Image (cartoon, rainbow, N blue to C red):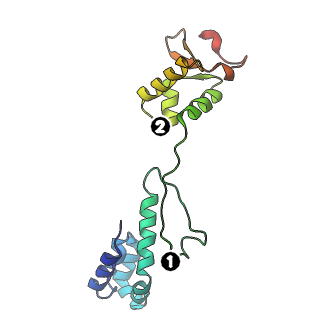
Amino acid sequence: MYSTFLAYFLWFCSFFGIAGFHRFYLGKIGTGLLWLCTGGLFGFGAIYDFFTLGRQVKEANYRAALSQPGYSRRTAPQGWRDAEDTDFRVIPAKKENPERIVLRTAKNNRGIITPGDLALEADIPMEEAKKLLDGMVAQGFAELRVRQTGTVVYVIPEFTDSSSPLEDL
């Protein structure tokens, strides 16, 4: 998280914003170089930054939070760029129910699913995928079958149809 105090401190230490150290700190490398080469846009940009640095820190924190995996964007009603006083919060993305992922994957594969298919689709370890599928077999929602090739597959009967390749199981 970026600090407003540190941003203003760097603004002050960079000759009242002319050198642009505060912009480098906030991840604005391009404008930081521009400020460094032009003296803070001949002083006008440095003065602008003095009045808007608080909002720039909030925006930098918002961008940093959005770059974290598992988070989704939540904007203020009036738009995040216009809402200077809004506390930007990023909420974790809702994780989908694993059984729903199993059913969707089985439906897409005409009733046949493997632990590898589930692990890829749900972004979970293979052991967890196998345990989930074994639980569905124990509850009677799926069947365990072995193909002629020796591959273990799980079958969800309600998603199979006449075109499913069940004859080689």
Q: Is residue 126 left or right of residue 94?
A: left
Distance from Cα at disc 1 to Cα at disc 2: 37 Å
Q: Residue at image x 59%, y 34%?
A: 100
Q: Which residue is the site of mark 1? A: 84
Q: Which residue is the site of mark 2? A: 123
Q: Is residue 145 left or right of residue 128?
A: right
Q: Position of residue 144 (x, y in %)?
A: 54, 14
Q: Position of residue 58 (x, y in %)?
A: 43, 71
Q: Secondary structure at mark 1?
A: loop
Mark 2, Cα crowd under 10 Å, few <14 / some 14-19 / many 20+, is few
Q: Is residue 123 left or right of residue 154?
A: left
As displayed, is residue 35 above or below residue 58? below
- In the figure, residue 111 lies in which quadrant? top right
Q: Position of residue 71 (x, y in %)?
A: 48, 53
Of the pair 157 and 47, the residue shown nearer to us: 157
Q: Residue at image x 44%, y 82%?
A: 52
Look at label 1 and name its amino acid: Glu
As displayed, is residue 33 above or below residue 43? above
The numbered mark, 1 or 2, whose residue comes first in the sequence reads 1
Which quadrant is home to the C terminus?
A: top right
